[in-house]
Image: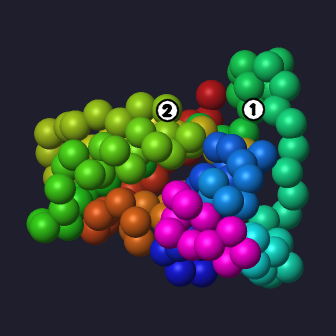
Amino acid sequence: MDATDSSIVSILQREARISFAELGRRVGLSTNAAAARVRRLETAGIILGYRAVLAEEEQEPGAGLQAFIDVRLKPEADSRSFLAWAQDNPAVRDAVHVTGPYDYLLNVRVPGMPALDALLHRLKTESGALQTQTRLALR
């Protein structure tokens, strides 16, 4: 999975009903190339399906995993770019600049461990994160 695939997955997580034309425009591909990428991601098992999220599910307390991720940025990383990345990621509930050995603390909610693993991978490949430390909320 390359950076374009990661961008496609990120967009589809927020807007599963986006047209291939609009998806392609956002990631710099033609309509046909965007459709082919989505089909390849589906065939590879990266995209397992699409679903409607009902209001009750979104507000259900305790649904999914809540985690806190300490993030240390690469020395050359731009804080504004990191915050823009975090703001565009639907799993990130809050991002705060902190003191100590890490630069930011993210409060995230994901459906399960595979989604957390994917989020951590994207953090390290897309956002400018050098190092992360993750803690799961137990209650």
The C terminus sits in image quarter: top right
Q: Is residue 127 left or right of residue 99?
A: right
- Which span of residues is magenta-colored? 24-34
Secondary structure found at label 1? loop
Upstream in sequence: badge 1 or badge 2: 1
Viewer-proximal residue, 29 or 128? 29
Task: Give the residue number, with chain letter if any, for mark 2.
Answer: 93
Task: Give the residue number, with chain letter if any, for mark 1.
Answer: 63
Viewer-proximal residue, 81 or 63? 81
Q: Is residue 80 left or right of residue 4?
A: left
For disc 1, the neighbor class at 10 Å (few under 14, some 14 to 19, many from 20) is few
Given the image, on which type of amino acid does mark 2 rest? Arg
For disc 2, the neighbor class at 10 Å (few under 14, some 14 to 19, many from 20) is few
**Point 52% across, 58% down: residue:** 26
Secondary structure found at label 2? strand
Report, in whole angstroms, how far the alpha carbon at label 1 lies from the one at label 2: 14 Å
**Front tag of 1 and 2:** 2
Given the image, on which type of amino acid does mark 1 rest? Ala
The correct choice, above or below, for 13 with respect to 123 in the image is above
User: Where does the image place residue 94, in percent across and percent down from the top left?
Assistant: 42, 32
The correct choice, above or below, for 104 with respect to 34 in the image is above
User: Where does the image place residue 115, in percent across and percent down from the top left?
Assistant: 66, 56
Is residue 116 visible to the viewer in this orientation of the structure?
A: no
**Point 73% across, 75% down: residue:** 32
Q: How many labels does the image show?
A: 2
**Point 60% across, 80% down: residue:** 1
**Point 85% across, 79% down: residue:** 43
Is residue 83 visible to the viewer in this orientation of the structure?
A: yes
Residue 22: name its quadrant.
bottom right
The correct choice, above or below, for 2 with respect to 6 in the image is below
User: Where does the image place residue 37, in percent across and percent down from the top left?
Assistant: 70, 76
